[in-house]
Image (cartoon, coloured by chain):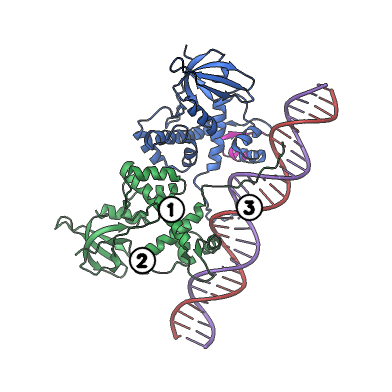
Chain colours: A green, B blue, C red, D purple
Amino acid sequence: MSIPEPARRTQPNADSAAEDYLKTIYHHTEWQSDPVTPSVLASTMGVAPSSVTEMAKKLSAAGLVNYEPYKPLTLTAEGIARARGVIRRHRLIETWLVDEMGYDWHEVHDEAEVLEHSISERLLDAIDARLGHPRSDPHGDPIPSADGTVHSSPALLLSQAGVGTTGTVVRISDRDPSLLLSLAAGGIRPSTTVTVVSQEAEGVVVVRAGSATDATGALVPVTASGTSSIWISSAI
Amino acid sequence: MSIPEPARRTQPNADSAAEDYLKTIYHHTEWQSDPVTPSVLASTMGVAPSSVTEMAKKLSAAGLVNYEPYKPLTLTAEGIARARGVIRRHRLIETWLVDEMGYDWHEVHDEAEVLEHSISERLLDAIDARLGHPRSDPHGDPIPSADGTVHSSPALLLSQAGVGTTGTVVRISDRDPSLLLSLAAGGIRPSTTVTVVSQEAEGVVVVRAGSATDATGALVPVTASGTSSIWISSAI
DNA sequence: GCGAATTTTTAGGCGCGCCTAAAAATCCGT
DNA sequence: ACGGATTTTTAGGCGCGCCTAAAAATTCGC
């Protein structure tokens, strides 16, 4: 009766913490050009820098991250593949929430953040099929395909566009809820046409060009490293 | 001991472990009449009895479980409400998987087991509305309504039906995947008409009565305490 | 009714992911 | 190029949910 059974381990969901690190590293390089250091990762993830170091070692041992003390973190090929898997799940869930479940494009991030770690491959595939294999999510972010391919359309970061530039919004980072809300309120969303009106120390003013005189504006913040959260198509 | 309160972190999803205990206790009393002891709970949940004791204390402190050393566990009113919440999520997810996502009724348990801990109230409500506020899931189990009400139709456990009894299957426990598979293979599912053909020491033979002479049979196991996993309507 | 069998609880550990504090390494301005 | 500022790593802990082993309580068989 007291036959020793194989020790069982706690399996919360998957390694959702590890997946979050991979996803965040990938995401950072998607939007920012500066290196991914422990402090950067720590502040975007809301954890202590020492926690990053610790996880970096673990991920490095697992062959997912290239880690050397005091150097920036990068993903290995395998790490990139895993990160894209998480991001695929995230973006398909966001798309599903908007297309079928009555969510608005700026409300879906948090829900997807949780579900991306618990949805099965089978259910994800069913959702993907139902949606007709979409290529991009409600924020305009490309959805990696099942085989890991990413089709991203050429675009320009708003912070790199000079005053006077006009273009179509193709992508808005889903990371900052309050920004999404203010953009949504200002009528700016993926596919909106915008013009860069002025550029100040820490912000860029954008004006919607929809109905000619309808000059609603919105302040789009730019990070310290000079990056914004919006990509526009290099139209005109 | 510690006077200062530095922000605590680590919140996996909710207290999914606690929710599992509540759900399992509730579920047990739904199907079985014997008391819920630590050993019973330990074996159905696949954990050590000592883990149950530990969690029982925690849940008791939280006012969800009535616990006294060496006595069976019962749920408090609050505990019942919380358990029904989890079960509502579980069963709505199962229903959704079958009705909209192309799953078969015997395949949905594991997926729901995971998602029930991560789905938000809002998304759950959206699913509930899409499905038209169903009263029961694909296994015939009643879905508690948002306010905690449960409408269960009067039924009879197969183990309590005498030989010769005929009735309609109204509920099949979703706990045992292999049983579900064999029942599905034997053509037995909710709404199937069955007749108790014989009753042996540890099993009950059931015959489908669908097309008169089509006498497919299935062996339905009965637990040590004399309970089966199927309820039939007390028809005829 | 009593000792044996069984169940339950207690005691002590473990891995995970996180933390703080302090030490070590790197970076940067003059 | 040097020393202070900053970043990163190390060291040591914590809570959670689980485990095993052993002690304590209860239950069962005769």
- The residue lying toward the viewer, choosing from A228 and C9, is A228
What residue range appears in magenta? Answer: B57-68
Q: Nearer the viewer, mark 2 or mark 3?
A: 2
Disc 1: CA contacts within 10 A as few (<14), some (14-19) or many (>=20): many
Q: Amino acid at mark 1?
A: Val
Residue pictured at 58% horizontal, 47% vertical? A10
Q: Which mark is residue B41?
A: none
Is A64 drawn above or below residue D18 in the view shown?
below
Direction front: furthest residue: B213
State which quadrant residue B98 falls in. top left
Dot 2 surroundings within 10 Å: few (below 14), some, or many (20 or more)?
few
Q: CA distance from mark 2 to mark 1?
A: 25 Å
Q: Which mark is residue A223?
A: 2
Could you tell me residue B205's position as x and y percent?
Answer: 56, 20
Residue at the disc numbered 3: B1
* Same chain check for tags 2 and 3: no
Which residue is denoted by mark 1 in the rendering? A86
Q: Secondary structure at mark 2?
A: loop
Distance from the alpha carbon under mark 1 to that under mark 3:
41 Å
Q: Is the residue B198 above or below the residue A14 in the image?
A: above
Q: Chain of mark 3?
A: B
The residue at the far left in this view is A213
Question: Which chain is home to disc 1?
Answer: A
For the point 52% across and 29% down, the residue is B182
